[in-house]
Every structure is written in structure tokens, then in C-alpha cells.
Image (tube, helix red, strand yellow):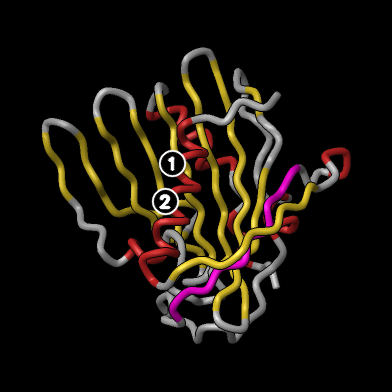
Amino acid sequence: MKKISPAMVLGLFALLALCLMTAGCTGTTDTTGDASSGTGPAATTSVTASGTSAPGGVPGSVTAVSYTALIAYLPNAPAGWTAEEPVGASWTVEDSQWTWASREYGKENAWATILIQDSAYYDVGYWQSWDSMISFESTEGYYKQGKAGGYPSWEYFNKPDSYGTWVGVNDRFMVYISVEGGSKSDLDAFVNAVNYGGIANLK
């Protein structure tokens, strides 16, 4: 039986909460993908959200790629880590959709999550908090701007061992990586394992 980590639970609740704050949710339909084909189990959820846009694009001017296409860009586990089966979902926004895919990784007492979302230029998911992030450093951690794979990013650290990075790709795709119970070098390994150029070229 697949173990659902706190990161996955929190990630799903965060996405659901963001949706609920903007509008409200409708019914849910679950589908299961074929693990042998690399699609993994996936949940398709129908949600109504506001039609505001993510930075730099017109909402709905593109069609979000399927979550199975995003799953293909979730990397294999780095050395010393093991990977869980990926999951994905499709959410309805007005007359369009946005999608995401996620995968969990484990090593001893550490675990990590990578989530990729295609917003289709809607202000949904992690894009809703992107512009509100600010740089700071304290005795307990930091948030700082940077670059990952040539794309703008935000990185955070919270004591004792909580790390994460958001990477905004072409104002449309968002990649979120978190590591709990690990190290900065673990975070860097996951950040560097993502093919951001390939994600940017998705149509």
C-alpha cells in the first residue's frame, strides 16, 4: 500500500485551499492510470476558479498539457533515494483546465516532493503566491530569489531541515521541490534533476 507522506497531503490541501479561496469546488471523479506505462495513479478533479491570469499570459490562451505529459518530466530518484509512483490531476477553470503532476521520494528519515503544474496562464495553484513572496533572512531560515535552470526561482529554508524551491517557467509552468529531513545538497540534487527546458517546450 502506498504511503502518503505529509508533503503530499499538505500539497494537495494547499491546492484545494487555493481553489476554495477563489471560488468553490464541484464534484470529483477519480481515474487510475497505468503504472506500467509510466502514467501512474491519477486523480481528475473538476474545479471552478476565478479567471485571473498568472504573470505574462492571457488566461486560457493555451490548452494545458495533460498531467500524463507532466508526469514524464518528474525525474527518477537521485542516488540514495527511492521514488514513489507519480500522481496527477486536471482541474477545470472557467471553460478551460490546468493540470499538475507530483512524485514523492524517500531516503532514510528524509523525504522529498516534486510537483509540476501547467497553469495555462491562470492565476492558480502556486502562481497565486508567487508575487507575494519576499526575500528575507533570519536566525530561523530564509526566502531568497535566484535562478534554477535559467528560470526565476524562490528558495526557502526553515530550521532545522526543511528546504524548498519554486521555479517559474515561462510564466506558465511552476515546478515546486521540497525536502524535509534532508540537506541543502539534497535540495540541489532534486532541483538540478528537473528538465526545465523540456517543460518550457511543452505545447
- Label 2 SS: helix
Which quadrant of the figure has residue 152? bottom left
Instruction: Look at 44% across and 78% down and name the residue there.
Output: 50
Q: What residue type is disc 1 on? A: Leu
Q: Does 192 lie within the magenta span?
A: no
> Is there CB contact under 8 Å for labels 2 and 1?
yes
Q: Is residue 198 visible?
A: no
Q: Identify which residue, 83 or 135, lies in the foreground.
A: 83
Residue of label 1: 10
> Residue 14 has which mark?
2
Residue farthest to the top, as pictured: 108
Instruction: Look at 70% across and 73% down and name the residue there.
Output: 203
Q: Is residue 91 above or below residue 137?
A: below
Q: Is residue 144 visible?
A: yes
Point out the image quarter for the N terminus.
top right
Q: Is residue 61 above or below residue 36?
A: below
Q: Identify which residue, 51 or 79, lies in the foreground.
A: 51
User: Mark 2 and mark 1: span between their CA atoms?
Assistant: 6 Å
- Residue range corresponding to the magenta coloring: 41-50
Q: Is residue 37 left or right of residue 148?
A: right
Q: What residue type is disc 2 on? A: Ala
Instruction: Look at 29% across and 54% down and name the residue there.
Output: 145
Number of residues whose C-alpha sits closer than 10 Å to that of mark 1, classed few (under 14), some (14–19) or many (20 or more) = few
